[in-house]
Amino acid sequence: MSTPTLTRRQKLSQLDQKASPYLYIAPFFLIFVIAGLFPLLYTAFVSVHKWNLIRGNLGFIGVDNYTWVLQQPRFWKGLRNTFSIFLLSSVPQVILAVLIAAALDANLRAKTFWRMGVLLPYVVAPIAVSLIFGQVFSDQSGVINSILERIGMGPIGWHKDVLASHLAIATMVNFRWTGYNTLIFLAAMQAIPRETIEAAVVDGASRVKTFLHVTIPMLRPTIIFVVITSTIGGLQIFDEPRMFDNTGAGGADRQWMTVTMYMYELGWGSQRNLGRASAVAWILFMIVVAITLLNYFITRRIASSGATQPRRRSLTRHTPGGTR
């Protein structure tokens, strides 16, 4: 039996059905290759060469850039500062975002106003936030130190002490990103079936117990997403510490200099050595990947261990007259 011959329009229709899905997703992969994958691979190529910002490639040197970077005390200080600021910002940020989302999910008046209000800090440019908070946390005439002096406490060296400077920068990060994560958690909370919440209330659970034992377990996939994105962004922090003072060097003793600031100093500072800067970038990339995978497996294990198997419903139905 011979197959029917397709017309030109029918062939074009079949080709359109097969090719359309790939054409729809092609822009994303094209942009990813140009703006993401190519710079990543090219940075790896530069990191194994002696590469000057002005004179360009000066020859292949292997892992010498990585060895040099790992022997620098300033790199380890930047790594310490990065992790300190990351922990002081990410952990409170997730907790505050969940609590604010729970408050916005309740029956409040002017819900739209409050939801727009928590997103406003995210819209503000990070440089503007850094300049404002740099004045708020000023050592001499800052708002916080003025309040502390009025209540009889001594001023805090926000730009001198290591922990104080990390707290100030973490406050900037929390100010910008808490509202953004709040809306993510709010969207996840609104996707929870209301019947589940009402069933817990009918069973006698209080609001706190319902929130802890019903809402939070159902937010675990969203919490995993927020933790991973906060980890990726927190370990690459640059704008806030860079603009915390007028010099942009991370303090006189580099007390709040992060890894990205150190990378910038190597590549575009006095050394202008893009090979060493690329090595720092790849070391940071591997650290981010390792911590992201660790966060993913830990949170996934917590989520799987906390999940309960659904109960199998009985196939029999009890009636006053007996069992059917």
Image (tube, rainbow, N blue to C red):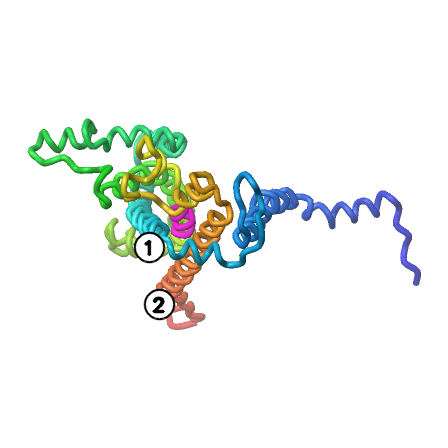
Q: Nearer the viewer, residue 322 or 122?
A: 122
Q: Which mark is residue 320?
A: 2
Q: Residue 215: in sight, yes or no?
A: no
Residue at numbered disc 1: 214
Q: Nearer the viewer, mark 1 or mark 2?
A: 1
* Mark 2 Cα-neighbour bin, 10 Å: few <14, some 14–19, many ≥20: few
- Range of residues picked out in magenta: 227-236
Q: Residue 189 in the image: x percent, y percent?
A: 38, 46
* Mark 1 Cα-neighbour bin, 10 Å: few <14, some 14–19, many ≥20: some
Query: Residue reaching furthest top?
Result: 141
Which amino acid lies under the numbered mark 2 shown in the image of this protein? Answer: Pro
Residue drawn 41% across the image and 45% down it: 260
Say left or right for 323 vs 254: right
Which amino acid lies under the numbered mark 1 shown in the image of this protein? Answer: Val
Q: Quadrant of the C terminus?
A: bottom left
Query: Residue reaching furthest left?
Result: 152
Residue 142 sits inside the magenta stretch: no
